[in-house]
Amino acid sequence: MATKVLFFDTSALIKMFVNEPGSSNVKWLTSPDTRVVNSLHFVLNEQVCIEFNQKIKHFLEAGRISLPKHDDILRKFNNHYKEKYFRIVGQKIISNTKQETNLEDVIKELNLTPGENDWDGMIYQSIINALAYLGGESHPILVSCDNRFGKKVKNQGYRVINPEKLSPDELKKLLTT
């Protein structure tokens, strides 16, 4: 069975901790049983970790979550999930035998706007550079609820899981193909 490497963006990661549309799909997708049965590996870009912490703080300030919930989410994420359940990667490739993709090229390729949505390019760059060291049959898949970013990545030939749009059956089918 080929390994499937799922790259989560902030919009999808949030759904593990805050109940929103698509949360049940993200929780199922990241469950230990689903992970093992489907040979899944989970990856976050460093930028996603920064954005996640900022977003949880924003939810507290906006009154969407309480202070105890805020503290619990950050404790769980930083002490359990980060670097343990999710591998954290930056923009650089691990292999020194392959050419890495740079952010400027990614911004041009995806038609992103510097200072506006170029952080999406960091996630995409992680996917491209991860392919340089993922030998064998591996299938990178973006997990994102950001329709614009997901469409750009899909247009580059990668699979995208939008947990807000897929039914549980569609999600299961995507993982088995």
Image (cartoon, rainbow, N blue to C red):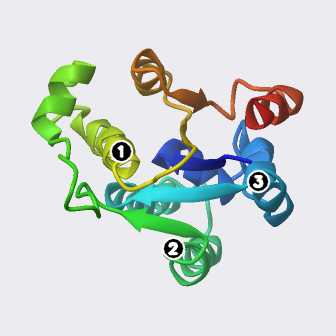
Q: Quadrant of residue 31?
A: bottom right
| Dot 1 alpha-carbon crowd within 10 angstroms: few under 14, some 14 to 19, many 20 or more | many
Residue 137 in percent (x, y) is at: 57, 44
Q: Is residue 110 above or below residue 115?
A: above
Which label was assigned to residue 27?
3
| Dot 2 alpha-carbon crowd within 10 angstroms: few under 14, some 14 to 19, many 20 or more | some
Between 39 and 9, the one nearer to me in the picture: 39
Tag 2 secondary structure: loop
Q: Quadrant of the C terminus?
A: top right
Which label was assigned to residue 82?
2
The answer to whether mark 2 and mark 1 are in CB contact below 8 A is no
| Residue type at tag 3 | Lys
Q: Which residue is mark 1?
A: 123
| Residue type at tag 2 | Lys
CA–CA distance between discs 1 and 3? 21 Å
x 55%, y 84%: residue: 79
Residue 140 in percent (x, y) is at: 52, 41
Q: Quadrant of residue 166?
A: top right
Residue 32 in percent (x, y) is at: 80, 65
CA–CA distance between discs 2 and 1? 16 Å
Q: Quadrant of residue 16?
A: bottom right
Q: Is residue 18 above or below residue 84?
A: above
CA–CA distance between discs 2 and 3? 16 Å
Tag 1 secondary structure: helix
| Residue type at tag 1 | Ile
Q: Name the mark nearer the viewer: 1 or 3.
A: 1
The answer to whether mark 2 and mark 3 are in CB contact below 8 A is no
Which of the two labelled residues, at mark 2 and mark 1, occupies the earlier sequence position?
A: 2
Residue 167 in percent (x, y) is at: 83, 27
Between 95 and 174, the one nearer to me in the picture: 95
Between 81 and 63, the one nearer to me in the picture: 81
Tell me how many marks there are: 3
